[in-house]
Image (cartoon, rainbow, N blue to C red):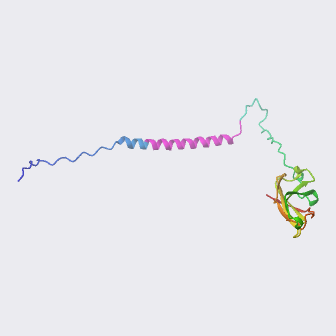
Amino acid sequence: MTDMPPMPATPPAPPAKPKRARSTNAIILGSAAAVIAAVIGTGIFVVQAMNDEDRPATTSSSSRATDEPEPVVEDDVEEPDLDLYVTDPTAADFEIELRTKSRQCFGSAGCNLVVEPELTYNGDTSELDPALTYEITYEITGDESGPILQTAELTDQTTLTFDTTVISTESRGTELSVEVTGVTTSEW
Protein backbone atom coordinates (compact mmCIF):
# COMPACT_ATOMS: atom_id res chain seq x y z
CA MET A 1 0.00 0.00 0.00
CA THR A 2 1.01 3.48 -0.54
CA ASP A 3 1.38 5.95 2.21
CA MET A 4 -1.38 8.47 2.34
CA PRO A 5 -1.20 11.62 4.28
CA PRO A 6 -3.35 11.69 7.40
CA MET A 7 -6.84 13.12 7.20
CA PRO A 8 -7.38 16.53 8.78
CA ALA A 9 -9.38 16.62 11.99
CA THR A 10 -11.93 19.11 10.70
CA PRO A 11 -13.21 19.53 7.20
CA PRO A 12 -11.96 22.63 5.41
CA ALA A 13 -14.12 25.76 5.74
CA PRO A 14 -16.25 26.57 2.71
CA PRO A 15 -15.02 29.54 0.69
CA ALA A 16 -16.39 32.84 1.92
CA LYS A 17 -19.17 34.34 -0.23
CA PRO A 18 -18.28 37.72 -1.59
CA LYS A 19 -20.20 40.44 0.17
CA ARG A 20 -22.54 42.41 -2.05
CA ALA A 21 -21.81 46.01 -2.00
CA ARG A 22 -24.74 47.79 -0.47
CA SER A 23 -23.51 50.93 -2.10
CA THR A 24 -24.61 49.58 -5.52
CA ASN A 25 -28.25 49.47 -4.40
CA ALA A 26 -27.96 52.96 -2.98
CA ILE A 27 -26.57 54.29 -6.29
CA ILE A 28 -29.37 52.70 -8.29
CA LEU A 29 -32.06 54.03 -5.94
CA GLY A 30 -30.46 57.48 -5.90
CA SER A 31 -30.28 57.61 -9.70
CA ALA A 32 -33.92 56.57 -10.05
CA ALA A 33 -34.98 59.25 -7.57
CA ALA A 34 -32.97 61.88 -9.46
CA VAL A 35 -34.59 60.93 -12.79
CA ILE A 36 -38.08 61.05 -11.28
CA ALA A 37 -37.37 64.42 -9.69
CA ALA A 38 -36.06 65.78 -13.03
CA VAL A 39 -39.18 64.61 -14.91
CA ILE A 40 -41.51 66.13 -12.33
CA GLY A 41 -39.54 69.39 -12.26
CA THR A 42 -39.59 69.65 -16.06
CA GLY A 43 -43.34 69.02 -16.12
CA ILE A 44 -43.97 71.76 -13.55
CA PHE A 45 -41.76 74.18 -15.48
CA VAL A 46 -43.58 73.48 -18.77
CA VAL A 47 -47.03 73.87 -17.20
CA GLN A 48 -46.05 77.18 -15.62
CA ALA A 49 -44.55 78.44 -18.87
CA MET A 50 -47.75 77.56 -20.74
CA ASN A 51 -49.87 79.31 -18.12
CA ASP A 52 -47.64 82.41 -18.35
CA GLU A 53 -48.23 82.58 -22.11
CA ASP A 54 -52.01 82.50 -21.58
CA ARG A 55 -51.98 85.46 -19.21
CA PRO A 56 -52.28 88.94 -20.72
CA ALA A 57 -49.32 91.20 -20.33
CA THR A 58 -49.68 93.57 -17.38
CA THR A 59 -49.11 97.27 -17.73
CA SER A 60 -48.54 99.87 -15.08
CA SER A 61 -51.35 102.27 -14.27
CA SER A 62 -49.28 105.23 -15.38
CA SER A 63 -48.98 103.95 -18.94
CA ARG A 64 -52.72 103.41 -19.45
CA ALA A 65 -55.58 105.59 -18.40
CA THR A 66 -58.23 102.84 -18.56
CA ASP A 67 -58.23 99.12 -18.07
CA GLU A 68 -59.90 98.48 -21.42
CA PRO A 69 -57.98 96.02 -23.59
CA GLU A 70 -56.28 97.42 -26.65
CA PRO A 71 -57.93 96.53 -29.93
CA VAL A 72 -56.16 93.81 -31.84
CA VAL A 73 -54.94 95.04 -35.21
CA GLU A 74 -54.50 92.29 -37.76
CA ASP A 75 -52.06 92.69 -40.58
CA ASP A 76 -53.72 93.41 -43.88
CA VAL A 77 -53.49 90.16 -45.81
CA GLU A 78 -54.27 90.47 -49.48
CA GLU A 79 -56.35 87.62 -50.79
CA PRO A 80 -55.47 86.64 -54.34
CA ASP A 81 -57.95 87.99 -56.84
CA LEU A 82 -59.50 84.88 -58.33
CA ASP A 83 -60.88 86.92 -61.23
CA LEU A 84 -57.30 87.73 -62.21
CA TYR A 85 -56.83 84.42 -64.03
CA VAL A 86 -58.29 83.29 -67.31
CA THR A 87 -59.58 79.82 -66.49
CA ASP A 88 -61.28 78.97 -69.74
CA PRO A 89 -59.34 80.08 -72.81
CA THR A 90 -60.67 78.96 -76.18
CA ALA A 91 -59.05 77.51 -79.27
CA ALA A 92 -59.09 81.01 -80.81
CA ASP A 93 -56.77 82.20 -78.00
CA PHE A 94 -53.95 80.05 -79.40
CA GLU A 95 -52.00 80.10 -82.65
CA ILE A 96 -50.13 77.02 -83.77
CA GLU A 97 -47.52 76.14 -86.38
CA LEU A 98 -45.56 72.96 -87.03
CA ARG A 99 -41.80 72.80 -86.72
CA THR A 100 -40.17 70.05 -88.77
CA LYS A 101 -37.57 68.19 -86.72
CA SER A 102 -36.58 65.75 -89.48
CA ARG A 103 -37.56 64.84 -93.05
CA GLN A 104 -36.75 61.80 -95.14
CA CYS A 105 -38.13 61.74 -98.70
CA PHE A 106 -38.30 58.75 -101.06
CA GLY A 107 -38.33 60.16 -104.59
CA SER A 108 -41.88 60.44 -105.81
CA ALA A 109 -43.19 58.09 -103.10
CA GLY A 110 -43.53 60.77 -100.43
CA CYS A 111 -41.77 61.75 -97.21
CA ASN A 112 -41.60 60.79 -93.55
CA LEU A 113 -41.50 63.82 -91.27
CA VAL A 114 -41.15 64.29 -87.53
CA VAL A 115 -42.94 67.47 -86.42
CA GLU A 116 -43.72 69.25 -83.17
CA PRO A 117 -46.10 72.09 -82.34
CA GLU A 118 -45.09 75.69 -81.81
CA LEU A 119 -47.92 77.22 -79.78
CA THR A 120 -48.47 80.90 -79.09
CA TYR A 121 -50.97 82.23 -76.57
CA ASN A 122 -52.65 85.43 -77.82
CA GLY A 123 -52.74 86.99 -74.38
CA ASP A 124 -50.60 87.49 -71.32
CA THR A 125 -49.54 84.08 -69.96
CA SER A 126 -49.47 85.54 -66.43
CA GLU A 127 -53.26 85.72 -66.72
CA LEU A 128 -53.40 81.91 -66.96
CA ASP A 129 -54.08 80.19 -63.63
CA PRO A 130 -50.81 78.51 -62.51
CA ALA A 131 -52.79 75.88 -60.58
CA LEU A 132 -54.45 74.61 -63.76
CA THR A 133 -53.26 72.44 -66.62
CA TYR A 134 -54.48 73.61 -70.02
CA GLU A 135 -54.87 70.73 -72.49
CA ILE A 136 -54.67 72.10 -76.03
CA THR A 137 -55.91 69.68 -78.68
CA TYR A 138 -54.79 70.23 -82.27
CA GLU A 139 -55.34 68.49 -85.60
CA ILE A 140 -52.63 67.90 -88.21
CA THR A 141 -53.72 67.30 -91.80
CA GLY A 142 -51.55 66.10 -94.70
CA ASP A 143 -50.72 62.58 -93.46
CA GLU A 144 -51.50 59.89 -96.06
CA SER A 145 -53.63 58.03 -93.49
CA GLY A 146 -55.77 61.04 -92.60
CA PRO A 147 -55.92 63.72 -89.92
CA ILE A 148 -53.94 63.22 -86.69
CA LEU A 149 -55.18 64.55 -83.34
CA GLN A 150 -52.60 65.44 -80.66
CA THR A 151 -52.74 67.20 -77.30
CA ALA A 152 -50.18 69.50 -75.69
CA GLU A 153 -50.31 70.47 -72.00
CA LEU A 154 -49.56 73.96 -70.72
CA THR A 155 -48.77 74.01 -66.98
CA ASP A 156 -47.51 76.63 -64.56
CA GLN A 157 -48.30 79.37 -67.10
CA THR A 158 -45.24 78.69 -69.29
CA THR A 159 -44.34 74.98 -69.39
CA LEU A 160 -45.51 73.26 -72.59
CA THR A 161 -45.38 69.45 -72.81
CA PHE A 162 -46.08 67.62 -76.08
CA ASP A 163 -45.15 64.55 -78.12
CA THR A 164 -43.48 64.74 -81.50
CA THR A 165 -45.58 63.41 -84.37
CA VAL A 166 -44.43 61.20 -87.25
CA ILE A 167 -46.15 62.04 -90.55
CA SER A 168 -46.02 60.12 -93.84
CA THR A 169 -47.03 62.12 -96.90
CA GLU A 170 -48.16 60.75 -100.24
CA SER A 171 -45.83 62.97 -102.24
CA ARG A 172 -42.94 65.34 -101.75
CA GLY A 173 -45.15 68.37 -102.42
CA THR A 174 -47.84 67.59 -99.83
CA GLU A 175 -48.51 70.59 -97.58
CA LEU A 176 -49.12 70.01 -93.88
CA SER A 177 -51.55 72.15 -91.92
CA VAL A 178 -52.41 72.36 -88.24
CA GLU A 179 -55.27 73.88 -86.27
CA VAL A 180 -56.14 74.12 -82.55
CA THR A 181 -59.50 72.39 -82.13
CA GLY A 182 -60.14 72.70 -78.41
CA VAL A 183 -58.85 73.69 -74.97
CA THR A 184 -59.80 72.03 -71.67
CA THR A 185 -58.55 72.66 -68.15
CA SER A 186 -57.82 70.43 -65.19
CA GLU A 187 -56.12 70.87 -61.84
CA TRP A 188 -52.71 69.33 -61.49
Residue closest to the eye, 74 or 184: 184
Residue occupying image coordinates x 39% and y 42%: 26
Given the current orientation, which residue lies at the most extreme bottom position? 145
Vertical arrangement, residue 73 with respect to residue 112, above or below:
above
Given the current orientation, which residue lies at the most extreme right position? 92
Which contiguous range is marked in magenta? Answer: 30-57
Vertical arrangement, residue 1 with respect to residue 175, above or below:
above
19 relative to 80 in the view: left or right:
left
Q: Quadrant of residue 77?
A: top right
Rendered location of residue 60, percent (x, y):
73, 31
Residue occupying image coordinates x 6% and y 52%: 2
Residue closest to the eye, 88 or 73: 88
15 relative to 21 in the view: left or right:
left
Mark yes or no: residue 114 visible.
no
Vertical arrangement, residue 110 with respect to residue 86, above or below:
below
- Main secondary structure of the magenta stretch: helix
Vertical arrangement, residue 70 with respect to residue 124, above or below:
above
Residue occupying image coordinates x 63% and y 40%: 49
Given the current orientation, which residue lies at the most extreme top position? 62
Given the current orientation, which residue lies at the most extreme left position? 1
* Image quadrant containing the N terminus: bottom left
Residue closest to the eye, 150 or 28: 150
Rendered location of residue 183, percent (x, y):
88, 61
Q: Quadrant of residue 98?
A: bottom right
Rendered location of residue 61, percent (x, y):
74, 31
Mark yes or no: residue 42 visible.
yes
Is residue 17 inside the magenta stretch?
A: no
Is residue 42 inside the magenta stretch?
A: yes
Residue occupying image coordinates x 92% and y 60%: 91
* Image quadrant containing the C terminus: bottom right
Rendered location of residue 30, percent (x, y):
44, 41
